[in-house]
Image (tube, helix red, strand yellow):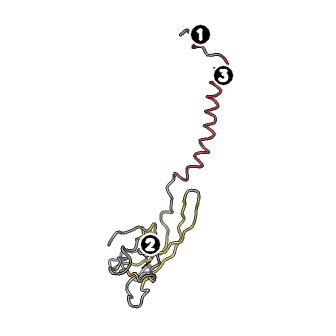
Amino acid sequence: MSEKDHRVSRRQFLNYTLTGVGGFMAAGMLMPMVRFAVDPVLRKGAEQDLVAVAQVDDITNEPKRIDFKIQQVDAWYESEEPRSAWVYKNEKGDIVALSPICKHLGCTVNWAGDKAHPNRFYCPCHGGLYEKNGKNVPGTPPMGPLDGYVQKVKDGTLYLGKAKPRGGA
Ligand code: FES
């Protein structure tokens, strides 16, 4: 191959240069737009970590229903989601915060909702029963214990986060 074959004409040089510069400029403009469009999807569904729900001194041994709201961010969509918890202090003085969502088919359980079982959580949909600690009563429809809320106490205030499964029967 002669040296002449390797020579680049002025026109070719300008074409290569302009194509390269144009490509960089286009990438520089497109990358922020692509990132803006895709970033919320890549982010994990963020949920507000912990919400102040009650003063610890107001919590007794009797389960009380506390309603609260959490900020939920799902990609581009932000919303306020209502939540509820059954909250009480156990015999050791530890705070217990249980989800009211029945583990059978998702109805809402109530503390002492059935006169025949005054010290249990009762689900009116199919007669599900749970002990005070949230454990499902064998022989009733639920196959697992009520979920427990992630919790934190700071400066005398109870904060709740997500309700998480606690395993069990
Ligand atoms: S949904 Fe609660 S017992 Fe069926």
Q: Which residue position holds label 2?
A: 156
The C terminus, quarter of image = bottom left
> Which mark, residue 14?
3
* For residue 35, above or below residue 49: above
- Judged from the image, the secondary structure of the residue bearing numbered disc 2 is loop
* Distance CA(mark 1)–CA(mark 3): 18 Å
Q: Where is residue 17, by image quadrant? A: top right
Q: Do the residues under discs 2 and 1 have CB atoms within 8 angstroms?
A: no
Query: Which of 33/144 is in front?
Result: 144
Query: Which of 152/146 is in front?
Result: 146
Q: Which of the two marks, 2 or 1, is nearer to us in this view?
A: 1
**Counting other residues with Cα less than 10 Å from the Cα at mark 1, is it few (<14), some (14-19), or many (20 or more)?**
few
> Which mark, residue 134?
none
* For residue 71, above or below residue 30: below
Q: Position of residue 11 (x, y in %)?
A: 67, 19
The amino acid beneath tag 3 is: Leu
Instruction: Identify the mark nearer the N-term, 3 or 2.
Output: 3
Q: Position of residue 147 (x, y in %)?
A: 40, 71
* Distance CA(mark 3)–CA(mark 2): 72 Å
Q: Which residue position holds label 1?
A: 4
Q: Position of residue 27 (x, y in %)?
A: 60, 37
* Distance CA(mark 2)–CA(mark 1): 85 Å
Query: Which of 160/25 is in front?
Result: 25
